[in-house]
Amino acid sequence: MDAMSMGVVIASAYNLVLHTFDGLPSGCFTHFPLRSPPVPVQERIEIAIARVGNNHFVQLFLQPHYPVPPFRTWWRDNASNQDKKWVDRYATRISLWEEIMDTRPRGTGVEFGGNIN
C-alpha cells in the first residue's frame, strides 16, 4: 500500500487533514480522520502531498484556502455523525476544486461565495 490508499489511516493517526494529489484528477483525494470531530481552524493541520513518478512523494506547500479534491465516498459510509462535520468545513473548497477541474456533479453542491473555513 502507498500513501494514496493509506490516506485515511494517516489522517486518523495524526488527527489531520491529508490532501493527496496524483497525475489525474481522479487520483486526487482529501482524507479526513475517522473517529475524530473537526478541530477549530486555528488548530487544524493540513498536509498536501503529491505522487511524483510511480513511487516518490513530495510535500506541497500551498497557499491558504486552496481548492481541495473530494473525499473518498466510502469515508462517509464509515464516519460517525460527528466525523461527517469535517465535510461541512471543506464543502466550499471541494466545490471550488470540482468547478476548476470540471468534475462537479450536476445539480448538487455548494455555490461559490460560501465560507471557506
Image: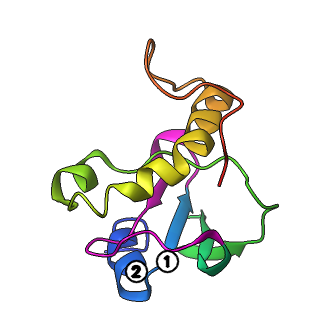
Q: Which of marks 1 and 2 is in front?
A: 1
Quadrant containing the N terminus is: bottom left
The residue to which callout 1 is attached is 16
- Quadrant of the image occupied by residue 96: top right
Disc 1 marks a residue whose amino acid type is Leu
Query: Where residue 58 sits: x, y (%)?
Result: 66, 75
Using the image, determine if residue 65 lies above or below residue 41: above
Q: What stretch is highlighted in magenta?
A: 22-41
Earlier in the chain: of badge 1 and badge 2, it is 2
Q: List the single residue furthest toward the top.
A: 107
Residue located 32% across and 78% down the image: 9
Q: Can residue 28 be seen in this view?
A: no
Residue nearest the observer in this picture, 55 or 18: 18
Task: Find residue 78 and report its horizontal and vertical position in percent.
Answer: 17, 59
Residue linked to disc 2: 10
Q: Is mark 1 on a helix, strand or loop?
A: loop
Instruction: Give the SS element for disc 2.
Output: helix
Q: Quadrant of the C terminus?
A: bottom right
Magenta-drawn stretch contains 112: no
